[in-house]
Image (cartoon, rainbow, N blue to C red):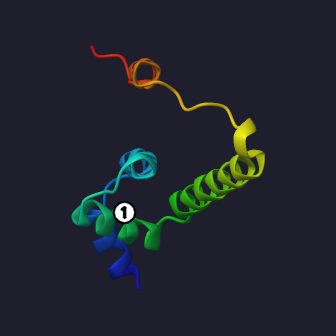
């Protein structure tokens, strides 16, 4: 079992990359390779797997509440607003 864990640790991305991919997967589908590597990482990292479950749970709650609110739900952000948010969340370049 230890050999398998070591092998998976070598072929899967580090946690920092997996967390970024989890966030990206909320916006658009990942490539098959990214998805497989991320799922393999979950076999050896309970923290990343838990993080993904938590994000999916939060997303489902927000969707459910938005559906219940119906017409009272706030309007979607404009493309410009989304781009401003993305720029502010990017790490600074050196």
Picture mark count? 1
User: Which of the 4 quarters of the picture holds residue 52?
Assistant: bottom right
Q: Position of residue 61 (x, y in %)?
A: 71, 54
- Looking at the picture, tell me which residue is in the foreground, 90 or 79: 79
Residue shown at the point (77%, 51%) measured from the top left: 68
- Looking at the picture, tell me which residue is in the foreground, 33 or 63: 63
25 with respect to 73 (left or right): left
User: Which of the 4 quarters of the picture holds residue 86?
Assistant: top left
Quarter of the picture holding the C terminus: top left
Relative height, residue 33 to residue 87 (above, below): below
- Looking at the picture, tell me which residue is in the foreground, 83 or 78: 78
Seen as rendered, the residue at the extreme front is: 71
User: Which of the 4 quarters of the picture holds residue 3?
Assistant: bottom left
Which residue does the numbered mark 1 point to in the structure image?
38
Q: Secondary structure at mark 1?
A: helix
Q: Position of residue 15 (x, y in %)?
A: 42, 51
- Classify mark 1: residues with Cα within 10 Å, few (<14), some (14-19) or many (20+): many
């Amino acid at each position: 079992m230890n050999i398998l864990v070591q092998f998976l640790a070598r072929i899967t991305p580090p946690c920092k990359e997996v967390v970024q991919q989890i966030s990206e997967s909320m916006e658009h589908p990942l490539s098959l390779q990214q998805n497989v590597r991320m799922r393999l990482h979950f076999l050896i990292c309970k923290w990343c797997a838990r993080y993904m479950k938590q994000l999916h749970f939060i997303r489902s709650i927000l969707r459910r509440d938005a559906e219940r609110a119906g017409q009272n739900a706030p309007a979607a952000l404009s493309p410009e607003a989304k781009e401003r948010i993305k720029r502010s969340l990017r790490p600074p370049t050196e």
